[in-house]
Structures are given as C-alpha cells and as structure tokens.
Image (cartoon, helix red, strand yellow):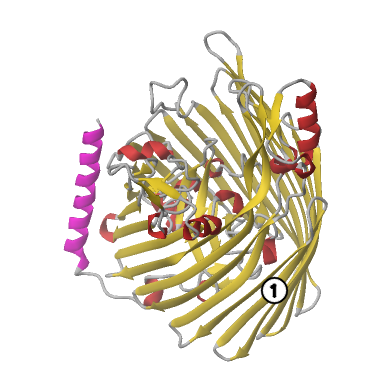
Amino acid sequence: MDKLSVNILWILLFSLVYTGFTQETKQTTEDSLSYFDLEEVVITATRSERKRQDIPMPVTVLSREVISNTGLRRADELLNEQTGITSITDQSGFKGIQMQGINSEYIMILIDNVPVVGRQSGNLDLSRLALGNIERIEIIKGPSSSLYGSEALGGVINIITQKPSDRELDLGVDAAFGSFETSDFNLSAKQKMNTFSYAVFLNRLSSGGFDLDENLNGNTVDPFENYTFSSHLNYKFSEDLKTAINYRVFYQDIDISGESEEWDTNITSITQHKWSSKLIADYELYFTQYQANQLELDPLNGDVLFDSDFNQRMFRPELRLTYNLNSRHEVIAGIGSNFEFLDRDLFENEVRFYSQYIYAQHSFSPLQKLDLILGGRFDIHSEYDSQFSPKASAIYKLNDHIGIKSSVGSGFKAPDFRQLYLDFTNSAVGYTVIGNRVEEAVIERLQNSSQILSLTVDPENLGQPLGAESSTGVNLGLSYQKNKFDFSLNAFRNDIQNLIDTRIIARKTNGQNVFGYVNRDNIYTTGLETDLSYAFTKNLKLSLGYQLLYAFDKEAEDRIEDGEVFIRDPETLITRRLELSDYFGLPNRSRHLVNFKIHYNIPEWKAFANLRLNYRSRYALFDTNGNALIDEYDDSFVDGFSLLNLTLSKSLFKNYRFQLVGENILNNEQTGLLNLPGIRITGKIQFQL
C-alpha cells in the first residue's frame, strides 16, 4: 500500500504540472503584488503594526494562505518546514523545536500575543496547537527579552488566531481522514453585528496511534483524542473605546493503561482606549492554566509505572501605551506583573513566582532612509536577580527594493520551577534529581535514611543560588524584494552565558547518583540563513531556504586548545590529543538545514500542487568515548535525512475544496527519530460559506 500511495501521488502531481504548462501560455504577467505580499503586517517584533519589509530584524510570516495550502493540522508540523527551524526530541523523550541552534526552552511561544505555559523539561508540545483557525504565524529570531522578558532568549513565535470578520456571516467546516485511524474536524463561524462581532472555532483530532519498535513495551504514540475550542468577542463602545475577550481551551485524553489527561485554558481581556489622535492605551488582563494528570499502569500486573500531577497557573495584568509624536517617531511603553503558581507532586509544596516589569521602545527615523528602534526592559523577580534587557536595531533602505538590517540585543531565561524545586527519584532505576533550592534539605533527608554513600561537592556549595541564563545576539542581514524575486540573507551570532546544566552532587548507596543544577556552560551559535523565492510565472513559484550552523561550547574549545582532551582513534588504536577540527559541536545540532518548495497553481482546474522538501544533515546525540564532548570519533551520529511532503488541492463548485496530503512520501527510515510512522496520507474536504 505504501508504494501504491506514492505512485498515486506522483501521477497526480505530474498530471497537474503537465496540464498547467499547456495552459500557461494563456496567462499574462501581473504586477509584483500578484507574486508576493509586500504589505504583510507584523506586530510581534515591535509590539506595533509594521510592514514586513520595514522590520529591522529576522522575521518570517506564515500567512493564512500559506498555512492552508500545506494541508497540515498542527503547529509543530508546519514550523518544521521553515528555514532554520527543526523539531528535536530531548533525552527525556519530550519534543520541541530548535531555532538558530537554540533549544525550545529558550524560545517564547505566544498565542495572540500572550505566553503559553505547560512546559515539560523546558519543551512546549506544539502539537496541541491546531492550525484550523490560525490567521498567521510570526517568527522573530534572536533575543527578544527587551519586549517579552524571560524565555525569549532565543526568539519568539507568535501564533495569531482569526478574529471576527466584517461580513454578516462567515461559516467554515472541514473534515480530514488519514492513516492510522486519524480524523480531524474543524468548525468555525465569524460574524459582525453592528458594534458587536464574534469568532468561534472548534476542533477535534483523534488517532489510533502507532508503534515504531515492537521490541519495546508500549506504543510510540498511544491512541488519543483532543478538542480545541476558542472564541473572540469584540464590542465597540465608540470610535475611541473598544474591548475584546479571547478564550481558548484544549483538552486531550490519551488511551493508556491507566489515565492520561491534559487541560490547557487561557482567557484574555483587552480594552483599548484612544485618548487622543496621538495616544492609545491598552489595558490587558491574562489568565492561563495548564493541567496534566498521568497514571500509567503495567498492563500485565497493574503495578504503577508512572504517576504525575502537574498544575501550572499564571495571571498577568499589563498596561501598554502607544504614543505617536509624528509620522517619524513612535514610543511604546508598558508595565505589568506576573504571578505564577505550580502545584506538582514532584515538589514538596506549591511553588510561586512573582515578578514586575517595565519596558519602553522608541522607533524613529533620523534620516529619510534610516529607521532605528531602541528599547529595553527591566524585570524584578522574587527568585533571581533583577534583569535589564536592552536592544537596538536599524534598517537602511538603499532604495525601494533593497534594505540592510542589523540588530543587537540581550536576552535572559530565569531558572524555572523544575531547576529550583524538583524532588524526584526514579523508582525503577534509583537515581534522584533535585532542584537548587531544596538541595540541602533533600541531601539531609537522604543522609538520615542512610541512602548517601558520599558527597561529590563541598557541603557549603549546596544550594548556592542559580543565576539567570543570559545571551547577547547579533543579526546582520540584507533583503531584496522586486517583482517576482524575494531574497533575504542574515548572519547571526548568539553568545549564551551561565547555561544551567546538571551536576552530580552525591553518590547513593544503591550505586546511582543524586543530580542537581548549576550554572556552568558558556556556548555560542553562529551561522547564516537565507530565503529565496522566485515566481517564474504568476502560477509557478519556487522557494529555497538554507541555514548553516556552528554551535560550540566555549569551555570545551578552551580544553582542546590547552591540550586537555584526548581521543583514541578507533582505526589505529593510537591515543592522541584532540584538535579543534575534530570537535563537532553541541548535541542535536545539524550543520545544514535545507528546505525547497514548489507551488504550482492551475486556474483552469481550480487546483494547485504544493511540494515541500526538508533536509537535515547529520548530527550527534551524545558523547560516547568519554571525553565529555562530541567529536568526529563518537558513534552516536544520526545520518542526514530528507522529508518530502506533498499537497494536492482542487476546488469544487463554489464553496468546496478537496485536499490530498502526503507526509514523508519518501518513507525515510530516519524519521523514527521524529515519531513519524512512515508514509502518512490524509484526505480533507472543506466547505466555506
């Protein structure tokens, strides 16, 4: 069936391309806006509406049309096809994304400009975010703590949902059915009624699951079903006063031996008051809660294998002011507080964080062709030192088509609840992991119960405060947009200090270790990114994206240069000093990421084909030869691999569209690392009124 599915997809693709070429001579060339949307508006980068070509930092915008044309269902699937972004799975088995070589825990995820909570080991599961009602996704690369605070050390991804339309009624329904008993249903409605408007969305996704390794107990992905409901309610009191209430809830039930449930709820109230033609005030209240309860039993004897309760809540009030002095000067300032609570059975008590912050940003044009943005944010936190995060960026427009962009900024990430208060012992293996704030108490408890054989650190160093991780990021780029051609090139460098890592603080009498957390590593990531799109005709568009990445630990480089690192050549069996050229870099980072996309439209058929190829070069998972770094002689390397996705679409009658989506149609064997079970075929029918 796999080969048959692939053959059918390729036959349909070639049929569409051949038919399109025979009709292409009838088409005429249109202006540049027919090829690329140069008027795309971005709000995440500067907290105000700006055209994409006017943003002085690396920005990617995925429009509603781009999202819909892929036929994909979840945010993680879509982001994995973008330049410089790849999905990774950490050693705990949690999946996240990596951007410019920076891991998921340092990338802030927003929905409608407010943060999403509920991270596991620092990773946020983006598969719980449905794409059915997404208006656009804005991706900002580089430190963004000057506006967004902690967790924006490596960048921001803002997922913006559809808002009420200006039409009397806008109704949409679609259903998709695919491999592994997968089904996906979406229902949406939008309407405007005088001063009141609303938008509601409902999604249900279910799957029968799959197993990639029959030799291991359990499934790779268990059967599940989940639901997403969101609503936007807007009321306009007058031309100068309006308010909106946004609500979203996600629920997931996973079919395991025991119980596994997730709840993700958030609600936002925003009131905008236009005090004058120059001053606008936004009053925002935001509450979010993430709950995960999992009880896993051994299907053979009913013994408890895993039992975890997780309940995180956050409340945030914020006041934001926008002042437009004139067309060349804009000032944005905000003040707010975060109140965070986490109740987890791995903690002795519920833990709480409190923080206050203030930020300001000035956008101005000192010269006709030069735009500058200067800003900074000051955070005061109950659990770590105060942080100041400045940022400066500039864009110089040589002409209407060419712009030179540069930005430099700092970011930070505060120690999280896990790194401060975790108290976990693996009952099966016997090791223990404890947070920084409870080290002394837990070690004393283990010593009193005769579980500690020896300490590996000075007792006076237990519980030494963790500092916030910090970064300095520089981006320098060039953009060119004209007619059929859209090109961008960006060079980046991110230096990260005080990375929080695990350390062994004690040996247990059972032969296992007690792990804690400490500020230790200083790393950097540097490289180049480029995106190129060219419309050969108004119906044929090709895109190419590429990232070159180098990611290294500075301390490891120093050890190599000092001659302190040795390697035994597996071929000659000779031990020698390691050279810098032998050092591969940080784990789970690929040197090369490539994506290639073809979009071919056939107006006569009301159809299109959308082909996306993504390549990731080899990478290593961990050190295997004992010298505490990854070199070319380690044997944990994963070979490079490609993912090929194809979407075929045909509009039917006036309001219907059918899509056939094939994922991993090359059936690449390496995709088990991404939890993809070979080829996946999905058929989707859409109705839009």
What amino acid type should be assigned to the residue bearing mark 1?
Gly
Dominant SS of magenta comes to helix
| Residue bearing mark 1 | 375
**Quadrant including the N terminus:** top left
Q: Is residue 523 above or below residue 238?
A: above
300 is within the stretch colored magenta: no
Q: Secondary structure at mark 1?
A: strand
Give the farthest residue toward the bottom: 367
* 15 in the magenta segment: yes
Q: Quadrant of residue 605?
A: bottom left
Residue 23 point in image, percent of width and height: 20, 63
Within 10 Å of the Cα at label 1, are there few (<14), some (14-19), or many (20+) other Cα atoms?
Answer: many
**Residue 320 can be seen in this image:** no
Q: Within the image, what quadrant is residue 407 found in? A: bottom right
Q: Nearer the viewer, residue 633 or 32?
A: 633
Q: Is residue 265 above or below residue 301?
A: below
Query: Which region of the structure is painted magenta?
Result: 2-24
In the rendered image, residue 362, in percent from the top left (x then y), is placed at: 70, 78
Q: Is residue 360 left or right of residue 35?
A: right
Task: Give the number of callouts.
Answer: 1
Residue 475 visible in rendering: yes
Taking 187 as reference, is 533 above or below it?
below
Q: Residue at position x 58%, y 23% from top?
A: 429
Tell me: residue 131, above or below residue 168. Answer: above
